[in-house]
Amino acid sequence: MFDSQSDLAALVYDKDQDPDAILRSFAADLLARGHRPVGLVQTGHHELDRRHLTATLVHSGEQLQLLQDLGALASGCRLDIGQLLEAGARIEAAIDQGADLVIINRFGKLECEGQGLCYLIDRALSADIPVLIAVPDYRFDDWIKFADGMSVRLKCNRVALEAWWNAVSSRSTGALHSEHISVCEALK
């Protein structure tokens, strides 16, 4: 069973959907409305040339290269773990400066293994900051195990995402986005 009021939401997508476009536009709209989303959103999910996969830090707009150039004959994983962990450190610093939402670009292979950016989920939830993560449909069972069942499953569309955000953000006192304090601090 899923907790419909959970501060942890999975934007579940299949191979024909582009969660990145939804996450990017949602983060941009939150910024425009005076909220402070922090996190990482992948760009290039559907591009044919995966050698140039990048991501954007939503709180700064900085573009990061996520893949290493291992040469034309390389067939292994090209993910630059160092760059991913550096992005995680920047997100963690942004959380410390105040955040209304943490966005994690993917629940991928590393996160399934307890690595990657999954530590940021615990970090954000411990600070009473809602978390949004894109989860491929084929990894949703792994996600539910990781989240101990305490996650909202969102359809990969803006309507579902906005409904979840409105429910989660309405529980705050309104001081969150004006002073960039955590939910926990606002409710004290």
Image (cartoon, rainbow, N blue to C red):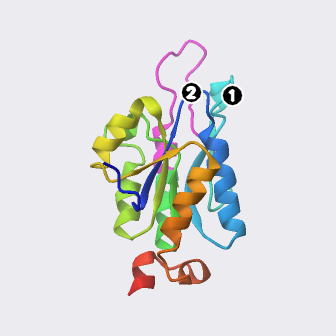
Give the residue at mark 1.
47
Rate crowding at label 2 as few (under 14), some (14 to 19) or many (20 or more) other CA atoms within 10 Å. few
Q: Where is residue 70 in the image (x, y as percent from the top left)?
A: 55, 23
Q: Which of marks 1 and 2 is in front?
A: 2
Residue 77 inside the magenta-drawn segment:
yes
Give the residue at mark 2.
15
Q: Where is residue 176 in the image (x, y as percent from the top left)?
A: 54, 79
Q: Is residue 56 visible to the viewer in this orientation of the structure?
A: no
Residue at the image point whose x is 60% and y is 69% from the top: 36
Quarter the C terminus occupies = bottom left
Span highlighted in magenta in the image: 63-86
Q: Where is residue 168 in the image (x, y as percent from the top left)?
A: 48, 67
Residue at the image point whose x is 59% and y is 77% from the top: 177
N-term mark: 1 or 2: 2
In the rendered image, which quarter is residue 21 located in? top right
Q: In this view, does 20 lie above or below 121?
A: above
Q: How far apart are marks 1 and 2 (CA)?
A: 12 Å
Residue at the image point whose x is 48% and y is 48% from the top: 133
